[in-house]
């Protein structure tokens, strides 16, 4: 399985690239959607956040007012770090479960769309890492237009994230989204070609198909061993029956066929050779 990391900054166009992957049939695990599910009323994440930030962040229906919570954390780095610490375990677990579901379905390529890919240390899970980059001026303008926010508010939200230049330096693939939508599509086609190349041996073994190929000989071996064990037990049982029927008895009396045998050792050897289908060539009968 190939897990592609997709990240970028706010208003960089990452969501557009994510939708392009979906349009080309590549499954995408969206960390933002996972985070929304984590904050649903009554969940473990919801309880942690309400306990830390108070019930003032709740709407009338009990759900978290994401806009209000966003205003709090983007204006206070300490509160933002607290929120990340509270939700990180739940989000990581949710992402892992989504990946597992896709693995079970047999997907060989998955895209993880995670805005805080590097900050959350999830870059270690993914290869290659695709960063959607845009210059700071364009990013600020797009954010202000998109959200209708003031310049100061937009800057505070941008500065709350790891800089795009730093993310770019750690990327395997960079998509420059400073230009037009047509230019973005052209770059995406090249990226699509790169990430849909044949899987490496390691990636293949991590896929469902690879796991089956690895487990199949083991399962066959177990089946053979069980069959072999049953055959051996049968032969040993037969050996005991023959021994009791034909070998000399302890009371000194003799059997009419006792001269065929010289002792228990020959019977053991006979039973084992019957099991292995090895010709005796006079070893059993003198």
Image: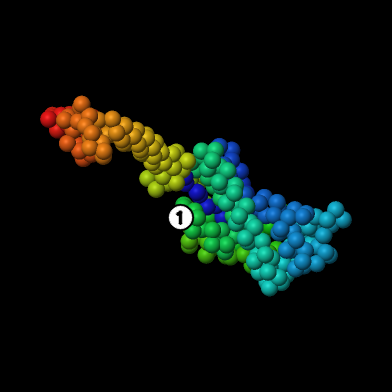
At 20% from the left and 38% from the top, the residue drawn is 263
**Residue at mark 1:** 172
Q: Position of residue 220 (x, y in %)?
A: 38, 36
User: Which of the 4 image quadrants contains residue 68?
Assistant: bottom right
Q: Can residue 5 be seen in this view?
A: yes
At 63% from the left and 61% from the top, the residue drawn is 88
Q: Where is residue 149 in the image (x, y as percent from the top left)?
A: 75, 60
Q: Nearer the viewer, residue 177 or 6?
A: 6
Q: Please say if 185 is above or below 90.
A: above
Q: Which of 242 and 113 is in front in this view?
A: 242
User: Which of the 4 image quadrants contains residue 105?
Assistant: top right
Q: Where is residue 213 in the image (x, y as percent from the top left)?
A: 40, 39
Q: Please say if 69 is above or below 264.
A: below
Q: Please say if 130 is above or below 77.
A: above
Q: Is residue 217 visible?
A: no
Q: In this view, does 31 lie to the left or right of 68?
A: left
Q: Quadrant of the C terminus?
A: top left
Q: How crowded is mark 1: few (under 14 residues within 10 Å), some or many (20 or more)?
A: few
At 27% from the left and 34% from the top, the residue drawn is 243
Q: Nearer the viewer, residue 237 or 137?
A: 237
């Amino acid at each position: 399985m190939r897990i592609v990391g997709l990240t970028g900054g706010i208003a960089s166009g990452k969501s557009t690239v994510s939708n392009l992957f979906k349009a080309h049939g590549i499954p995408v695990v969206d960390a933002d959607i996972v985070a929304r599910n984590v904050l649903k009323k009554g969940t473990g994440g919801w309880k942690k956040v309400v306990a830390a930030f108070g019930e003032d962040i709740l709407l009338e229906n009990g759900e978290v007012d994401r806009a209000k919570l966003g205003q709090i954390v983007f204006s206070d780095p300490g509160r933002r770090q607290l929120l990340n610490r509270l939700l990180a375990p739940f989000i990581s677990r949710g992402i892992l479960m989504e990946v597992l579901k896709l693995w079970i379905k047999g997907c060989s390529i998955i895209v993880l769309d995670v805005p805080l890919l590097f900050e959350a240390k999830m870059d270690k899970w993914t290869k290659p890492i695709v960063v959607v980059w845009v210059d700071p001026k364009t990013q600020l303008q797009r954010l202000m237009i998109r959200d209708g926010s003031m310049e100061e508010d937009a800057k505070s939200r941008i500065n709350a994230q790891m800089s795009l230049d730093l993310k770019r330096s750690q990327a395997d693939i960079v998509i420059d989204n400073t230009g037009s939508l047509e230019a973005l599509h052209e770059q995406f086609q090249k990226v699509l070609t790169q990430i849909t190349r044949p899987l490496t041996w390691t990636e293949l073994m991590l896929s469902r198909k690879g796991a089956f190929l690895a487990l199949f000989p083991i399962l066959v071996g177990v089946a053979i061993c069980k069959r072999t064990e049953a055959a051996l037990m049968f032969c040993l049982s037969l050996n005991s029956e023959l021994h009791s029927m034909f070998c000399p008895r302890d009371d000194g009396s003799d059997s009419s066929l006792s001269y065929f045998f010289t002792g228990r050792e020959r019977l053991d050897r006979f039973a084992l050779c019957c099991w292995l289908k090895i010709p005796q060539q006079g070893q059993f009968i003198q």
